[in-house]
Image: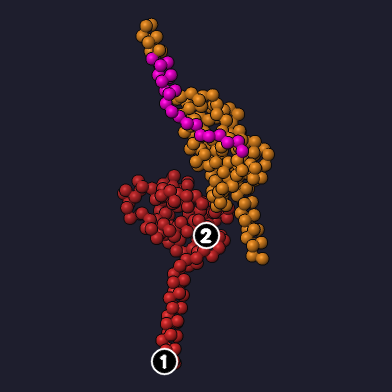
Chain colours: A red, B orange
Amino acid sequence: MKKLLLIPALALTVFLFLQATSKEANETTIVSVEFDNEIPAHVKAVIDQKCYGCHNAESKNEKGKKKLDWDDFESSRKAKQLATMAKINETLVEGEMPPAKFLESKPEGKLSPEELQTLLDWSSGKKRAPKQ
Amino acid sequence: MKWGTYLLGLLALLLLGIQLVPNELPEVHIYNSGDLIQSGLVSEDVAALLKTACYDCHSNETHFPWYAKVAPSSWLVAKDVKEGRESLNFSHWEDLNLMQQLGKLDDIAIEVDEGRMPMDIYVKMHREAKLTDAQRRLIVAWAEDTMDRLVEASEAYEDEEEY
């Protein structure tokens, strides 16, 4: 009788453990504030889609190019990259990019909440564990 | 002649009237524990330049000229100092994190290099704030050098933490 109870008890324990582990894997934890020389692929994907159009070396948008040129970013020195990230973060927090005027004619250019969070996390300099 | 006198009188009345419009100048604090120059990041010659060319608007140590107490110029002074402190306040330098400090230093280098700062209207009223090309180069070099030094220092700190 006691042995029979053991099996469901064990199953319940294992089940509880599984709950705990899958939950942990879903949460992002800040691993370190170390600087990564390369932009992570999931960040780069957002940049390419939502920022690069105006912020590139050949851009006809002179102001956009002058303020931030992604073609220039990875080749610049570390301090400059971090400075640029800080300014990107400030701009995004203030909600100034992409510009409201630009979005009037191109509403699909708006950052989704997930995309915004991706850029905010990256530009804050905090390295997060990748989602599993 | 009579009309001219009336007009002058009216103008004088108007000037007196606008003095009553409330206008608050940003507060002045001489002692600021988080000040940039006190943080030891600035050489003496650069500190002197920052004090004369930047600190009136970009710190809590504003020296208000007499026309800051007279409308309508007081309105402009109040607005410029307020906005200047909002975008960069050297008195609160230590409150910024490393990334923010780097961003501000990069902005300083760009604005000073391209001649946008100090603002034309400020330099017109404060001839001593006019920067020569050599002085501009000095500030730009200081800002860029300080960016690298801050990054190196933070890396050294991180290495130490690992042991």
Q: Percent x, y for residue A24?
A: 46, 71
> In the rendering, which numbered label is found on residue A4?
1
Query: What is the span of residues highlighted in magenta in the rendered image?
Result: B10-31
- Frontmost residue, A19 versus A115: A19
Mark 2 lies on a secondary structure that is loop
Same subunit, labels 1 and 2: the answer reads yes
- As shown in the figure, which amino acid type bears the numbered disc 2? Lys
Task: Tell me if B48 is positioned left or right of B113 in this view.
Answer: right
Of badges 1 and 2, the one in the foreground is 1
Q: Residue furthest top?
A: B1
Name which residue lies at 47% across and 59% down. Answer: A121
Tell me which residue sits at (40%, 16%) in the image: B13
Comes first in the chain, label 1 or label 2: 1
Q: Circle 2 sits on which residue?
A: A126
Occupied quadrant, residue A111: bottom left
A17, B152: nearer the viewer: A17
Q: Amino acid at mark 1?
A: Leu
Element carrying mark 1: helix
